[in-house]
Image (cartoon, helix red, strand yellow):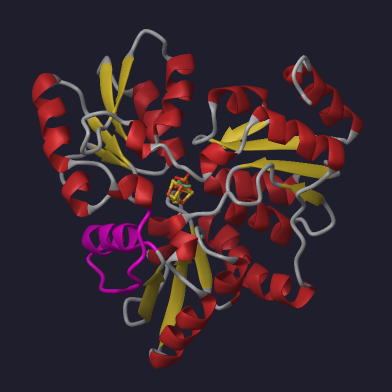
Amino acid sequence: NLSGLDLRAEIDRLRKERNAVILAHYYQKPEIQDIADFVGDSLELSRIAAETDADVIAFCGVKFMAETAKILSPDKIVVLPDMDAGCSLEDSCPPDQFAAFRAKHSDHIALTYINCSTEVKALSDIIVTSSSAEKILSQIPMDQKIIFGPDKHLGGYLVRKLGREMLLWPGVCIVHEAFSETELLKLKAQYPDAPVAAHPECPAHIIDHADMVGSTSAILKFAKETTSTTVIVATEPHIIHQMEKAVPEKTFIGAPGADGNCNCNICPYMALNTMEKLYVALRDLTPRIEMDEELRLNAKKSLDRMLEMAS
Ligand code: 13P
Ligand code: SF4
């Protein structure tokens, strides 16, 4: 029974006792973002996980992120407050089907979004995040054929933006898929001066209305720096917490789903992590990410290429 515990103080105490670092993605609940040592996008959190000298990484995000931390920092204990925190993109891409797809297109290299399983990373040549994808793709020779998975919307955005064909795996993020174009247009009519900042996991019919497209960190930077006082945010709405902290005088509106509000765009996987579960994870050092060493080394190759090409 955890009622009566001062969770903030207890998490703080355990963090010091365990020599732990708490990493949180921008889609985490505000109280988790506030207690984290670092809040960031997928690339930033991967870099911190690779470089930290902490003994324990408490990863407040989803499973593929905690697994990435373990791949890059195998000697650390990596805990994930809720092991059921998955991702619809990872689920859309079972490793055996991905292996068959690769075998069918053996003259293609596999450029793969970090939102996938460790097995799929091991089957890939280069990993990308939303903040590194354009930079990495532009370093690949134009005559090299490419498979891009599992996010067909990020893939489609890159194809349109860089004018280069890729074979796309048909996966989607259920959160970004849920934005409604009709409701977004209504909101834009209501706030004609507000720019729309969108994540590239959004479908094209949302991206088409965006003034800025980028990773969570890029969207946050845009929100801080734009001269506009109201911004429409087309990504998971928990990121608005950081925007309100940084520029409280501005107004941030989450892009709506079909019901006209942004609640259906909360990531159900990210939402599984709570302060209670973070406390238990630090106290018991479980649920812990464990991984076969051969699989880890194979997955690390494609992640290392990302870190080299993105730097
Ligand atoms: P980034 O934070 O890298 O933009 O990724 C967004 C996301 O959907 C993570 O699951
Ligand atoms: Fe996966 Fe989308 Fe949730 Fe990110 S927001 S973890 S891509 S389901």
The extreme top residue here reads 249
The extreme left residue here reads 189
Image spot of residue 280 (x, y percent): 78, 35
Q: Which contiguous range is marked in magenta? A: 151-173
Quadrant assignment, res 105: bottom left
Image: 156 above or below 95: above
Image spot of residue 193 (x, y percent): 15, 20
**Residue 15 inside the magenta-drawn segment:** no
Q: Residue at x 64, y 48 (%)?
A: 47
Image spot of residue 311 (x, y percent): 55, 53
Instruction: Kindly tell me whether residue 41 is visible in this rendering.
Output: no
Instruction: Kindly tell me whether residue 306 is visible in this rendering.
Output: yes
The extreme right residue here reads 17
Q: Residue at x 63, y 32 (%)?
A: 274
Q: Residue at x 45, y 91 (%)?
A: 103
Quadrant assignment, res 219: top left
**Residue 164 inside the magenta-drawn segment:** yes
For the residue pair 228 and 190, the one nearer the viewer reads as 190
For the residue pair 24 and 310, the one nearer the viewer reads as 24
How many marks are shown on the rendered structure? Answer: 0
Image: 31 above or below 20: above
Going by the image, does 80 lie left or right of 30? right
Image: 85 above or below 4: below
Image: 43 above or below 157: above
Q: Residue at x 85, y 41 (%)?
A: 284
Q: Quadrant of the N terminus?
A: top right
Image spot of residue 30 (x, y percent): 54, 24
